[in-house]
Amino acid sequence: MIRVVCALIEKENQVFVAQRGQYQGAHGQWEFPGGKIDPGETEEDALIREISEELCIEIAVHERLGEVVVKENRLILIGYVCSWVRGSLKLVEHQDSRWVAPSELLLQDLSTPDMPLVARYLALRGIES
């Protein structure tokens, strides 16, 4: 199975979501950004690298939200709560992005594998879903 990390990036009481670009699978789907873990890389290092490559920003990695097994895609999605440290956001792979209040995450058209991470995130933050 392929191991993939994704970031629930917090900034000013909001969470970042991005819309997949036209050259990505599931074009137009909203997601938490991230990517594959390279051999020899820790989950945290992979996440920092992927966010730097995809969004041109620096993040700090915090709580691990756990894993979601996606059997049909043969991957394991691992979510982390992160915070924006610095940088000017630039969408390299995504076609759109937005910042939403945590309570609005369930209203977004997020990819199916991201939804269990939303529930865990809201529980961690003490927000009813």
Image: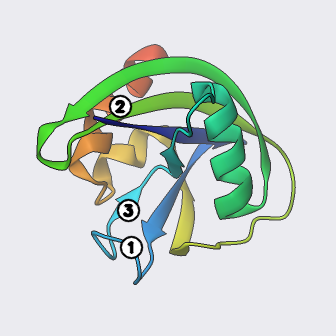
Marks 3 and 1, how far apart at CA: 12 Å
Q: Secondary structure at mark 3?
A: strand
Going by the numbered disc 1, the residue's amino acid type is Gln
87 horizontally vs 114: left or right = right
Mark 1 Cα-neighbour bin, 10 Å: few <14, some 14–19, many ≥20: few
Kindly check if marks 1 and 2 are in contact, taking CB atoms under 8 A apart as contact: no
Q: Secondary structure at mark 2?
A: helix
The answer to whether residue 9 is above or below residue 17 is: above
Q: Nearer the viewer, residue 120 or 34?
A: 34
Residue 24 numbered mark, or none: 1
- Asked if disc 3 and disc 1 are in contact, CB closer than 8 Å, the reply is no
Q: Earlier in the sequence, mark 3 or mark 1?
A: 1
Q: Residue furthest left?
A: 72
Where residue 117 is drawn, which disc sits there? 2
Snapshot quadrant of residue 8: top right
Label 1 – label 2 distance at C-alpha:
21 Å
Q: Amino acid at mark 2?
A: Leu
Q: Position of residue 43 (x, y in %)?
A: 57, 27
Is there any visible trace of residue 91 in the rendered image?
A: yes
Q: Secondary structure at mark 1?
A: loop
Q: Which residue is the site of mark 3?
A: 30
Position of residue 17 measured from the top left corner of the image (x, y, whole percent): 50, 56
Between marks 1 and 2 in the image, the one whose residue lies nearer the viewer: 1
Q: Is residue 73 left or right of residue 1?
A: left
- Displayed quadrant of residue 19: bottom left
From the viewer's side, name the closer residue of 63 and 52. Answer: 52
Label 2 environment density (alpha carbons within 10 Å; few <14, some 14–19, many ≥20): many
